[in-house]
């Protein structure tokens, strides 16, 4: 899906999200660069890694996300690439490939998922790591219930979710309200479509492409429990 229309909202909502930064920067310091980030968004994670002095290649298809990302990482030497993780052709290998914060939830079919993992396998150095995190579907909340997501610099964000269990799809409908100085309310609507993964689906997928892996229920490498907010995977080629 094209993130360009929601780029300003994404940056407002998540620029201060830091739960995963230590996990990914530690991997970058351990495995070295260049690090390839797939779905680098507005550069939240790329920036944190580059600030540690590790080279980053940030792959992002949405032009408005890349534009914000380039600004956010200015002066840090991050290499921004327009590209699609389903069609990786970078003519080199990387010691670390990462896909933080649900980027893989934008692979909607088995063919898309397989094309992406095949590309990761081809671009990962022997002994290198592929790390990613996705939402734990055990936490899918109530459907159709309007929630106030937050207030961001004068913008009120509301959302409600639609869950399609047979498609393993989660649709998040955003209502973004901004009050102009003249008192006029402007409402924008956006829908984010994500495909979620179950734990054993991820494990079977990685095994099918000859990866070994460790699975965690959090960024401090906690075991997976029903309360875990995320599934965190660290994988390497057998
Ligand atoms: C939830 S955001 C995560 C952004 C960033 N990784 C972060 O942690 O803040 C998901 C990103 O994946 C990107 N994306 C969606 N489909 C993609 C694809 N096929 N290839 C590469 N990136 C994609 C989106 O444009 C978006 O920037």
Image: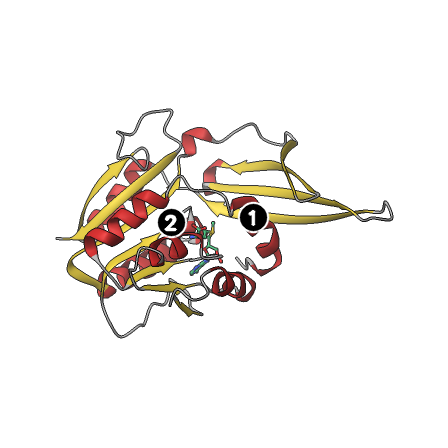
Question: Distance from label 2 to label 1 (Cα)?
Answer: 17 Å
Queried on whether the Cβ of the residue with tag 2 lies below 8 angstroms from ligand 1, the answer reads: yes
Queried on whether the Cβ of the residue with tag 1 lies below 8 angstroms from ligand 1, the answer reads: no
Name the residue at the bottom extreme.
Answer: 91
Q: Which of marks 2 and 1 is in front?
A: 2
Specify few, some or many for label 2: CA neighbours under 10 Å numbering under 14, 14-19, or 20 or more.
many
| Residue 218 location (% of width, % of height) | 32, 34
Is tag 2's residue or tag 1's residue first in the polypeptide sequence?
A: 2
Q: In this view, does 67 lie to the left or right of 123?
A: right
Dot 1: element = strand
| Residue 47 location (% of width, % of height) | 40, 56
| Residue 44 location (% of width, % of height) | 44, 52
Q: Residue at x 43, y 66 (%)?
A: 75
Q: In the rendered image of this protein, does residue 12 appear above or below residue 218? A: below
Mark 1 lies on residue: 192
Q: In the rendered image of this protein, does residue 216 appear above or below residue 105? A: above
Q: In the rendered image of this protein, does residue 226 appear above or below residue 69? A: above
All told, the count of numbered labels is 2
Q: Which mark is residue 165?
A: none
Quadrant for residue 85, please give it. Answer: bottom left
Specify few, some or many for label 1: CA neighbours under 10 Å numbering under 14, 14-19, or 20 or more.
some
Q: Which residue is drawn at 53% across and 48% down?
A: 193
Q: Is residue 30 left or right of residue 51?
A: left
Task: State whether residue 160 appears in this view.
Answer: yes
Q: In this view, does 134 lie to the left or right of 144?
A: left
Ligand 1: quadrant of the figure: bottom left
Residue nearer the viewer, 5 or 108: 5
- Asked whether the beta carbons under mark 2 and mark 1 sit within 8 Å of each other, the answer is no
| Residue 74 location (% of width, % of height) | 46, 65
Quadrant for residue 73, please give it. Answer: bottom left
Mark 2 lies on residue: 100
């Amino acid at each position: 899906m094209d993130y360009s229309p929601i780029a300003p909202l994404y940056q407002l909502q998540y620029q201060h999200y830091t739960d995963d930064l230590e996990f990914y920067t530690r991997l970058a310091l351990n495995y070295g660069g260049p690090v390839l980030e797939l779905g680098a968004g507005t550069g939240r994670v790329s920036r944190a890694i580059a600030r540690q002095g590790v080279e980053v290649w940030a792959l992002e298809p949405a032009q408005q996300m890349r534009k914000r990302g380039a600004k956010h990482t200015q002066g840090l030497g991050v290499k921004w690439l327009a590209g699609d993780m389903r069609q990786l052709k970078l003519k080199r290998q990387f010691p670390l490939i990462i896909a933080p914060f649900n980027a893989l939830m934008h692979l909607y079919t088995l063919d898309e998922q397989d094309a992406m993992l095949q590309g990761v396998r081809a671009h990962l150095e022997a002994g290198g790591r592929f790390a990613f995190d996705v939402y734990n579907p055990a936490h899918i909340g109530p459907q159709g219930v309007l929630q106030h997501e937050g207030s961001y610099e004068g913008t009120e964000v509301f959302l409600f979710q639609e869950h399609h269990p047979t498609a393993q799809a989660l649709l998040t409908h955003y209502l973004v309200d901004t009050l102009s100085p003249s008192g006029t309310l402007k409402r924008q609507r956006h829908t984010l479509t994500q495909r979620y993964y179950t734990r054993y689906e991820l494990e079977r997928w990685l095994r099918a492409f000859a990866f070994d892996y460790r699975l965690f229920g959090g960024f401090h490498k906690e075991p997976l429990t029903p309360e875990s907010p995320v599934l965190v995977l660290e994988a390497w080629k057998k």
